[in-house]
Amino acid sequence: MTASMYRGQANPLWELLAEVRHRVPPGSRMIREAFTTEHRRPVLVKVSDLTPDTFYEFDEITAQAFHDAVIDIGARDGGGRLTVCCPFPGELHAQQRRLQRVAGKVERIRVLMVGSARAMGGHDTATDFYDIAANPLARYSFAIKEGARPLLFICREDRRPRATGMRRSAGFFAVGRDVVEEVADDVELLLRGAATTLVTFDELELLHRTTQRISRELESYSRRMEWAVRRARRRPELLTRARFDRIVGQAIAKMGQLKEIPRQALRSIDRNGF
């Protein structure tokens, strides 16, 4: 992906990450990659090094920074449709002034909220409001900008209680047209009552979990093999023909188990009708 693809405009990935970096304090500029460990420790990534379509764990500050950055960049680009989901109490009120400024710069704004749209009062005619109180979309927070330079940030709150009392969410951002349009289509289906889940979100989450599980299994098995090799070098008389055959057999069996992990994931997708 290069800047030339966007008629001289800035690379959307660089622009989005730069916007987010400027919006978060220094203490929030390292983000944990979801489901990922390295030597049994979580992997932390700098904001400037984040990659699209990858699941991360966001605190409230960083999630809001991504949310606002998509809205503001989308407004600067102009045109297209902006969809904003504000499911948490008070969140829409905090966004109202920003959305009023954006309303004249994009073709249409669609605001998804928990509660009656009449509570907003005097809203712009270019803005459509949807009450999602009984909709699965109420579990998510997102901003989607469709148009010449599509952008997306979406996350789902982790409802497990935390000692800090702060919300944490798992989700991803995207700058590619395919993923952005797929999520936008999923939102449309849920608003119409023609679906019960955000299919693209669930598929990407399952893919990321599966990939990381395979990586952890490989890392664990690699450590065991390294230990066996070091021991054999120290005590070569221990590496008998029978022991060698057993190690090779274990390696073959492990490869078979790793191949089965993505197959199980695909069967899970089929069962759930993704």
Image (tube, grey):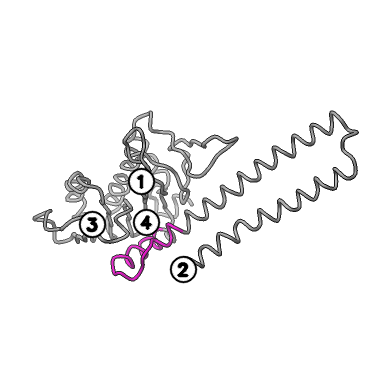
Q: Which of 161 and 192 lies nearest the eye of the viewer? A: 161
Above/below status of 67 relative to 232: below
- Foreground pick, 182 / 108: 182
Q: CA distance from mark 2 to mark 3?
A: 28 Å
Residue at far left of view = 122
The label on residue 111 is 3
Query: Pointer 1 and pointer 3: residues touching (CB < 8 Å)?
Result: no
Q: Position of residue 105 (x, y in %)?
A: 22, 54
Task: Count neighbours of disc 4 (C-alpha within 10 A) and say few if under 14, some if 14 to 19, many if 20 or more.
Answer: many
Asked if 9 appears above or below 49 in the picture, the reply is below
* Residue carrying label 2: 273
Q: How many marks?
A: 4
Amino acid type assigned to the residue bearing label 2 in the image: Gly
Magenta part of the protein: which range?
180-202
| Residue under pointer 1 | 159
Magenta segment's dominant SS is helix
Q: Nearer the viewer, mark 2 or mark 3?
A: 2
The residue at 36%/33% (across/down) is 163
The numbered mark, 1 or 2, whose residue comes first in the sequence reads 1
Amino acid marked by disc 1: Arg
